[in-house]
Each structure stands twice: as structure tokens, then as C-alpha cells.
Amino acid sequence: MRAIIFSIVGGLLIGLVNATATNASMQDDVNQAVTIIQRFQEMPDRAIPDRVLRDAKGLAILTVTKAGFIGSARGGSGIVVARTAKGWSGPSAIGTGGLGVGFQAGVEITEFVIVLNTQEAVNAFSKGGNVTLGGNLSAAVGPVGRTAEGNVALQAAMYTYSISQGLFAGVSLEGTVIATRDEANTEYYGKSVAATDILAGKVKAPAGAQKLPQVLAKYSAK
């Protein structure tokens, strides 16, 4: 009986995750990305070090909701941007979802910033398919603190940072699968566009995306 209930609830939760990722407004995700970066950097002792942002080849920024009753499921949406010769690229839409086990209840919202430290990491998000964090590319919880400049050394292809309910969470995303949301990109840019071209800076970003590179420039200027 427990297995049957878990299966039913799990199916409903997965459906909710998929619906959320599909219907999420990309402009909302862009606006939320601005808020998340600002929120992280307002915590000096837990902020992403400026040096990490200066050296970053790209950033993936997501909001993930985890809901549970008997079983658990999580789903979220966000954007990824890459550094180009002319500055930050326009945003490409991404989403994630999954099912967990165990007896849990309630809803938890976590905000994530994934710093892409290598070009290989950026390329993984450019291919328009699925990216598994910690698969071929190493992922680790990143160093923190605005004053950590002298102690920062590259240790992984991707650094993950997280805030849950306003508090630094330090949650690793290793094993999480993140997918490109092609339909959201098409709707946002008004035409069919490839994630490869967006992250290479070949596609002009809509006016609604202009604030994000401005905020990033404040913390990541070379």
C-alpha cells in the first residue's frame, strides 16, 4: 500500500515539477537571477568572493522548489550566462527536476548560483541538452566570503552556492541534471535560437535582460 501511495504522489509531484519548468516565465527567471546575485553579495561573510566571479567563465542561476509528502520532488527554473569578449552573453533558459525517497513534508525553496570555472563547463550548457553536475565535470561547494581573495584556488570545474529561506545553505548539487529550456528561449527571443549562439554572444539579449550584466559587472569586473 505504501508503495502504491508513493507512486501516486510521486507521479503528481513529477507532473507539478514538469509543469512548473515548462510554464515558468523567462523574464521572471532573469529578474530573479538579478535578485539572487544581489542577495548573495549582501552577505559579506558568505558572499561569493569577487575573485571567483571575476574568473568565472559563466554562471547558472536557479530557484529550486522542493515539495514533499511521503515522497519528495523538486523542480526549478533559471538561466545561464557566459562571459564573452564583449561582456556577458544574453541568458539561456534552464530547468531541473527530480524525485526523492523518504518520509518528508513541507515545501522548501532554495536559490542556487553555479559558477562555471572552465570553458568546458560553459560548453556543457551550450549544447542544448542535459548537464549532470559532478559527472564528467567536477562540482563542489564554492569558497565564501568577500575577503577570501587570497585563499581562492580553482578546485572544481563548477562551484555551487545556495541560499535557503534567506540563510546560507551550502548545499551541493552534485548529481543534479539541468536541461536547456528551448521553448522558453524561443519565446523570450522571439525566434528559434540555439543555446550555443546565445552563450557565444551571437544573439542580442532582449531589453529586459540588460540589468543582469550590469549587476554582474559590479562584482566581476576584471
Image (spheres, rainbow, N blue to C red):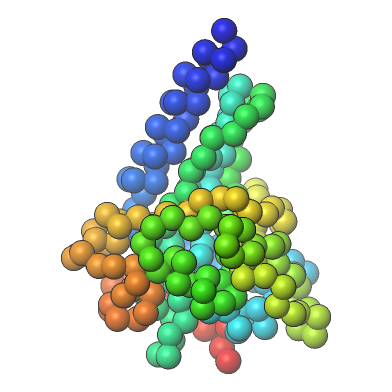
Place of residue 161 in the rendered image (x, y in percent of width and height, measured from the top left): 65, 62
Quarter holding the C terminus?
bottom right
Quarter holding the N terminus?
top right
Q: Residue furthest front?
A: 136
Place of residue 148 in the rendered image (x, y in percent of width and height, measured from the top left): 78, 79
Q: Residue furthest right?
A: 151
94 up-or-down from 46: above or below: above
97 up-or-down from 141: above or below: above
Residue 25 at least partly seen? yes
**Which residue is painted at 24% across and 61% down in the image?**
186
**Which residue is painted at 50% across and 20% down in the image?**
7
The picture quadrant where one finds residue 87 is bottom left
Residue 63 at least partly seen? no
Q: Residue furthest top?
A: 1
**Which residue is painted at 51% across and 65% down in the image?**
60
121 up-or-down from 204: above or below: above
Place of residue 16 in the rendered image (x, y in percent of width and height, measured from the top left): 42, 34
* Number of on-image labels: 0
**Which residue is painted at 51% across and 74% down in the image?**
120
Residue closest to the eye, 117 or 44: 117
Place of residue 137 in the rendered image (x, y in percent of width and height, measured from the top left): 59, 65
111 horizontally vs 198: left or right:
right
Residue closest to the eye, 54 or 145: 54
